[in-house]
Image: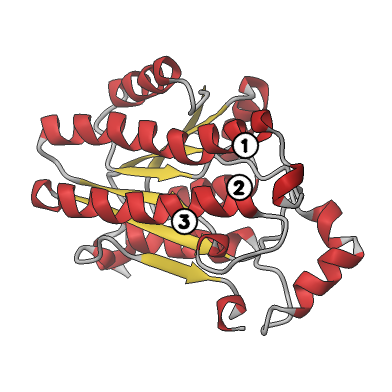
Amino acid sequence: MEQFSLDGKTAAVTGGSRGIGLAIARAFIEAGARVVIAARNEAAVAEAAASLGARCIGLGCDVGDPASVDELAERAWALGPVDIVVNNAGVSPYYKRAELVSVEEFDEVVRVNLRGAYLVSVAMARRMFAAGRGGSIINISSVAGIVPLERQGVYAATKAGLHQLTKVMALEWADRGVRVNAIAPGWVETDLVDELFASRHGERLLADIPMGRLAQPGDIAGAAVWLASDAASYVTGSVVVIDGGRQLR
């Protein structure tokens, strides 16, 4: 459908070298967009960009570092105006009860998941304002920001914060044509959760999903294409939950 076309648009996707970010980048390209993917591992992001073809380039970026984010924004905009931004970079390495998480671990999750999304959104939005073009910013969050999940306290707190940040940015930026939304996936089958779901704890988590399966990265990518496209031109400040019914438990 023409409404879902991204022809002539340019998108920037952080955490784009694998998993959900890579699936979103691929879906954007299939919808007609040019895509810049970014990740901390420059070799991995270059390899991922090569796999996506001529309409994708890969750039190194540490989203928690303001200087690195500014460099990403400058290099992406040097290729042409950026219409779509996906804040997908995130970490969730600590399946621990709250009292077992170290201060260093806490700070790293906040730095990437919340500070990173803030820095990238602001850097890109300022350029969108200056260009007078508007745009779509999509924050990849989690159902953990809505439903308490055991051993995910710090991660869940960053995602709950990201939901509120999404709504405030949507409110403040609507009159300048920048839409800001979030996607809140449940458990997605990526290499980040393989070990967890091979455990007895993972079996219990799977049993809590009414649809009886993990999401695939493509399940999230479809929603991202919709939010990036003209089909969602009147959608801002929304949190789109894609969790197989997990939050209904």
Mark 1 nearby-residue class (10 Å; few <14, some 14–19, many ≥20): some
Judging depth in this view, the residue of 22 and 213 nearest the camera is: 213
Question: Coloured how?
Answer: secondary structure
Answer with mark 2 or mark 3, whichever residue precedes in sequence: 2
Residue at position x 33%, y 70% from top? Answer: 1
Residue 55 visible, this angle: no
Labels 2 & 1 near each other (Cβ < 8 A) = yes
Mark 3 nearby-residue class (10 Å; few <14, some 14–19, many ≥20): many
Find disc 3 in the rendering and name its residue.
160
Residue at position x 60%, y 47% from top? Answer: 154
Distance CA(mark 2)–CA(mark 1): 6 Å
Distance CA(mark 1)–CA(mark 3): 15 Å
Answer with mark 1 or mark 3, whichever residue precedes in sequence: 1
The secondary element bearing badge 3 is classed as helix
Residue 21 visible, this angle: yes
- Give residue 108's position: percent from left, percent from top: 60, 31
- Give residue 183's position: percent from left, percent from top: 45, 60
Given the image, on which type of amino acid does mark 3 rest?
Ala
Given the image, on which type of amino acid does mark 1 rest?
Phe
The secondary element bearing badge 1 is classed as helix
Find disc 1 in the rendering and name its residue.
106
Given the image, on which type of amino acid does mark 2 rest?
Val
Find disc 2 in the rendering and name its residue.
154
Taking the image as shown, residue 117 lies to the left or right of residue 168, namely right
Location of the C terminus (image quadrant): bottom right
